[in-house]
Image (spheres, rainbow, N blue to C red):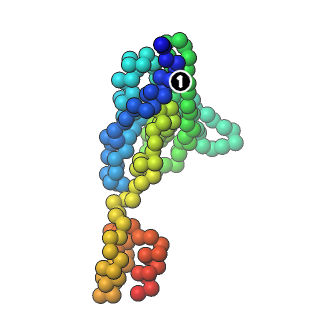
């Protein structure tokens, strides 16, 4: 029995894994890139008789100063059937420290990552965008923090090292 494109895509979506091989030294976290996703999809292409393409379209709107890149990720089967998902990403031309080609390249990479993520159902709730605490852990012991402040320690020093809940911060501020 030959699988439909929907069945092939469902198999890929349930079997697919993509490593987070890139490291953000500023935020101290790992993330996956479009290149990581494309590399991870390759074994499935021959296995299920599909191909994947990524197309981009520059959208310029006369009413907006912001150029937009629409990225479409498409899976194709041998019968010519296709299924696609898209992402829309604005190009920040005011981003400091980047030349215009870098600004477009950054937006392009981001758009590809999310179009492919949508197609293969990559759950980014555990990705850096959702979980980054910028190197801070939760405050392990509120009583020790209270003692530290009562003995002359500063709340800012605790906040630099730990992620405080609003309730914890209020409690420590009132000491």
Task: Name the secondary structure under disc 1.
Answer: helix
Q: Residue at x 52, y 49 (%)?
A: 94
Q: What residue is shown with label 1? A: 6
Quick check: can you spot residue 101?
A: no
The one nearer the camera, 40 or 71, is 40
Q: Residue at x 63, y 35 (%)?
A: 60
Would residue 32 appear left or right of 111 to someone viewing this image? left
The one nearer the camera, 103 or 13, is 13
The one nearer the camera, 60 or 55, is 55
The one nearer the camera, 123 or 158, is 123
Q: Residue at x 31, y 84 (%)?
A: 147
> From the viewer's perspective, is residue 99 above or below residue 81?
below
In the displayed image of the protein, which residue is found farthest to the right?
A: 63
Residue 3, image x and y in percent?
49, 17
Would residue 59 appear left or right of 39 to someone viewing this image? right
Residue 114, image x and y in percent?
49, 38
> From the viewer's perspective, is residue 152 above or below residue 40?
below
Residue 152, image x and y in percent?
31, 86
Residue 24, image x and y in percent?
34, 49
Quarter-of-image position of residue 131: bottom left
């Amino acid at each position: 029995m030959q699988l439909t494109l929907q069945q092939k895509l469902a198999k890929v979506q349930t079997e697919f894994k993509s490593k987070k091989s890139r490291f953000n030294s500023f935020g101290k976290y790992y993330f996956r890139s479009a290149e990581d996703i494309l590399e991870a999809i390759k074994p499935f292409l021959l296995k299920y008789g599909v191909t994947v393409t990524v197309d981009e379209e520059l959208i310029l709107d006369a009413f907006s100063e912001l150029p937009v890149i629409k990225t479409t990720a498409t899976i194709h089967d041998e019968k010519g059937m296709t299924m696609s998902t898209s992402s829309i990403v604005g190009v920040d031309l005011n981003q400091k420290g980047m030349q215009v080609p870098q600004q477009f390249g950054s937006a392009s990479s981001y758009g590809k990552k999310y179009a492919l993520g949508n197609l293969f159902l990559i759950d980014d709730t555990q990705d850096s965008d959702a979980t980054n605490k910028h190197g801070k852990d939760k405050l392990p012991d509120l009583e020790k923090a209270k003692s530290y402040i009562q003995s002359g320690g500063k709340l800012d020093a605790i906040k630099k090292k730990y992620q405080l809940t609003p309730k914890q911060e209020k409690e420590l501020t009132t000491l």
